[in-house]
Image: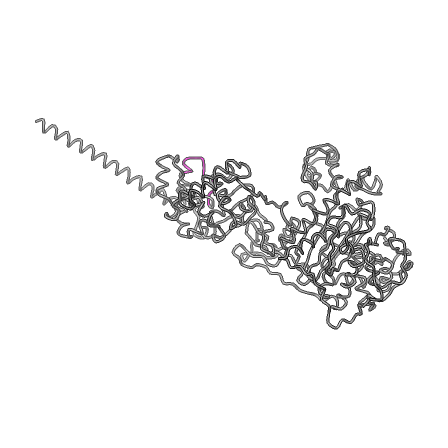
Amino acid sequence: MATNKKSAANNKQEENFSKYIKAFWKIYVGMVVLAVLFFLFASWGFFGHMPTFEELENPESNVATEIISSDGETLGKFYLQNRTPVKFADLPDNLVKALVATEDERYYEHSGVDARGTLRAILTLGRGGGASTITQQLAKNLFHGEGSKNLVMRVIQKAKEYVIATRLERQYTKDEIIAMYLNTVDFTHNAVGIRSAAKVYFGKEPKNLTTEEAAVIVGMLKNPSLYNPKSHPNNSKARRNVVFHQMEKNDFITEEEKVALQNKDLEMHYSPESHKEGVATYFREYLREFMKKWVEDNPKEDGSTYDIYRDGLKIYVTIDSRMQKYAEEAVQEHLANLQEEFFLQQKNNKNAPFINISKEETEKIMERAMKNSDRWRMMKDEGKSEADIKKSFNVKTKMRIFTWKGEKDTIMSPMDSIRYYKNFLQTGMMSMRPETGHVMAWVGGVDYKYFQYDHVAQGARQVGSTFKPFVYATAIEQLHIRPCDSINDSPFTMPRGRYGIEADWTPRNSDGEFRGMIPYSEALAKSVNTASAKLMDRVGPKTVVDLTHKLGITSKIPEQPAIALGAVDVTVSEMVAAYSTFANKGLYMKPMVITRIEDKNGVVLYQQVAKPVEVMNKDIAYTVIKLLEGVTRSGSGVRLRTGKSNAASYKRVTGHPYQFTNPIAGKTGTTQNQSDGWFIGMVPDLATGVWVGNDDRAAHFKSITYGQGATMALPIWAIYMRKCYNDETLKVSKKEFERPESLSIDLDCDDHKETVKDSVDTNVEPMDEFGL
């Protein structure tokens, strides 16, 4: 009886256990079915959009347009997100190993989802480490971004990540996925993607990253803000050392290497990238304006317009990053020094920086500057009255200002800041290959962040004596004069009515002296005004203006005799291109800044071809070159050769003595009241023009000592060329200009031997002597 009861009890227990087993399997099967359905629903888009095959093939992303120099360096980018993708082949092995060791140890074993990692995350509720593989992180970055804080939504997002990850694994190779992932990460500080991160934090391309640098970047992946080497160096170093531990754990480095690496200090070369900072800022802004028009004129095949901030275009430009760097350094070295002299000379000027103008003229200048300011525009847009706006300009406020020793925080009124910035000498500098028209360097001002007016292409300034070679070239062609022929440097008056002038015009030389009979070679070298005026009288203003137009000068030039002395405004870019024609045997080349434009896939969308235009025969061009060589042998540019000068003080003439020995053709230019200083210099394969002056012409040096082109502009040219010559990789020519075969113009001037001495530019005329 007892046995039967025991047997019945056992049977009942077995039935109950069987019920639990069945219930378990029902629940298990149900959960599997639900999980399968859940993932199926996710893949079908029930929980929101899922990427199509085409979207997986071409994921939408904001890719920066990159500006690439002629020597292969990135000059800058146009972007909403500062991101430029790289291929796996451009990633260093140490970076890939650090990534896999730290973020996904079984990356090469799974197919997008790591089952072991997922199970560990579930069992430990995430405390044992995350379950996201590199592929899942890529899916998240590409298609939905940061995870939701809502638990239900986060589970749905995870399911979508799993589905997308498996699809990505079928679509791309493991190497491609790593590259895509690193290209999508936002590393903060305006660095999106591995290439921008390498540039911003270490100033180099990804392929050149050291193991320590690679570990810092991989360490940031966990939390780019918290482990940022710029913002949180201690956190970054600690996280970097975790990466080293993971690399050693996965046998990518040895224990000894790990210890040595962990003991190293955190090193960084922080190089922030922005539109207003970095190299070639003025050129990049010029290029941006060019691209705005280009995209309108060159639509995509579907008729839509390229977006320079999103479409990842590659713009290959003629600028050489090394020469651009040397040009910017030359400007910095000279103008930082010369600016000190300017401030010293203005110290006792109650109306600084303006010279010899009335109170009414000063007020007009200041009011015009005030109304052109961003502050005025913004307050006007806010509906403020003109009276209230003007009042605000006299209220002192905190501001950061530009100085040559770095930015400075100060307190001053906006009106005082306008006057402060009027003190600064500005510059426009362009360097160009005469034979190709390729622009190699472009400096539009002293600091784009504070002075956004481009003095290369935007700002036309009075050119002074740099205009005289155009008069001489016209005379050589029209009158068949030779450099050895003589002209009488004597008083000259052009009568009223000739060429339409309204009063007698009597130009004078700056020193008030006349030299009598001198060869034309000396007349140009010494920038003798009477000689240029007499030549203009013989050829007429129209023929000279016609020549300048053939030389590519589009600035309006009046057909008046006074242009012989440079009373005309022309841009730096136009002047350099015009002079280059003489070095290029009479062939004009329009300045070229872009060689080609490609889309993000490397398809060429635009390619520029140089088109030479014959302006004058090569004999005339060569003759002008020889005349301009005389300027640097015995004229206003002779300080390029010598070790001393007649100038009262050389403490501000940076880089002197220069002592160049190679052939240089050039011309200085100085305008009335010393408001504009020029030097345009050429060697056979490089023409470079420099202008220096204040933005407002009423602000200038008091005397010719510092206000001439030979002091303001020539030193920048000389420092730049010295740097170019010292860089043997550039191979800038030191040879003679090529002499045409069977030259038809006699250049033998042995009868007029010249003595080498420094002289100032002689085009320093009062306004009335320009006929204006």
Residue 29, percent from left and from top: 28, 40
Q: How many marks?
A: 0
Write down the quadrant of residue 349 in the picture.
top right
Which quadrant: the N terminus?
top left
Magenta region includes residue 261:
no
Is residue 50 found left or right of 765 in the rendered image? left
Residue 183, percent from left and from top: 50, 48
Q: Nearer the viewer, residue 592 or 250?
A: 250
Q: Nearer the viewer, residue 16 or 624?
A: 624
Is residue 444 found left or right of 199 in the rendered image? right
Residue 589, percent from left and from top: 69, 62
Write down the quadrant of residue 149 in the picture.
top left
| Model colouring | one colour
Magenta region includes residue 149:
yes
Q: Nearer the viewer, residue 110 or 257?
A: 257
Above or below, 145 relative to 615: above
Residue situated furthest bottom in the rendering: 742
Please report the bounds of the magenta region as a residue range: 143-154
Residue situated furthest top in the rendering: 2
Residue 754, percent from left and from top: 83, 61
Write down the quadrant of residue 449 in the picture.
top right
For image coordinates 75% across by 49% down, the residue present is 692
